[in-house]
């Protein structure tokens, strides 16, 4: 069984936010959040650089 199936069955949700703190350790969740935020920053920075280069 994969993690998404476990979360869906334990939370009873098929969409929306599901908190996985009971399954994952806090430091793993923090690392995943940091990775997600870093990727968002990369996208914004890349878009800015590309738009500046087109001017």
Image: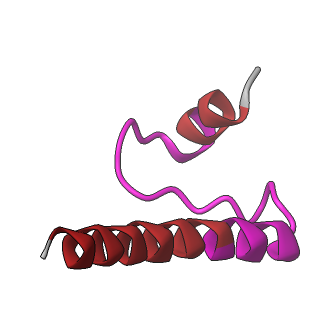
Q: Nearer the viewer, residue 38 or 6?
A: 38
Image point (49%, 71%), residue name: 42
Image point (77%, 61%), residue name: 22
Question: Which quadrant holds the N terminus?
Answer: top right
In the picture, residue 38 is in which quadrant?
A: bottom right
Give the residues in magenta.
Answer: 9-34
Image point (62%, 41%), residue name: 7
Answer with left or right where residue 13 lies relative to residue 53.
right
**Magenta-span inclusion, residue 55:** no
Q: Position of residue 55 (x, y in %)?
A: 12, 76
Q: Nearer the viewer, residue 34 or 3?
A: 34
Q: Position of residue 16 (x, y in %)?
A: 35, 52
Is 19 rendered above or below residue 1? below
Q: Position of residue 41 (x, y in %)?
A: 46, 77
In the picture, residue 43 is in which quadrant?
A: bottom left
Q: Nearer the viewer, residue 38 or 31?
A: 38
**Magenta-span inclusion, residue 11:** yes
């Amino acid at each position: 069984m994969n993690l998404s199936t476990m979360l869906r069955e334990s939370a009873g949700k098929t969409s929306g936010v599901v908190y996985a703190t009971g399954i994952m350790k806090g430091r793993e969740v923090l690392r995943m959040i940091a990775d997600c935020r870093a990727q968002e920053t990369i996208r914004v920075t890349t878009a800015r650089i590309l738009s500046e280069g087109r001017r």
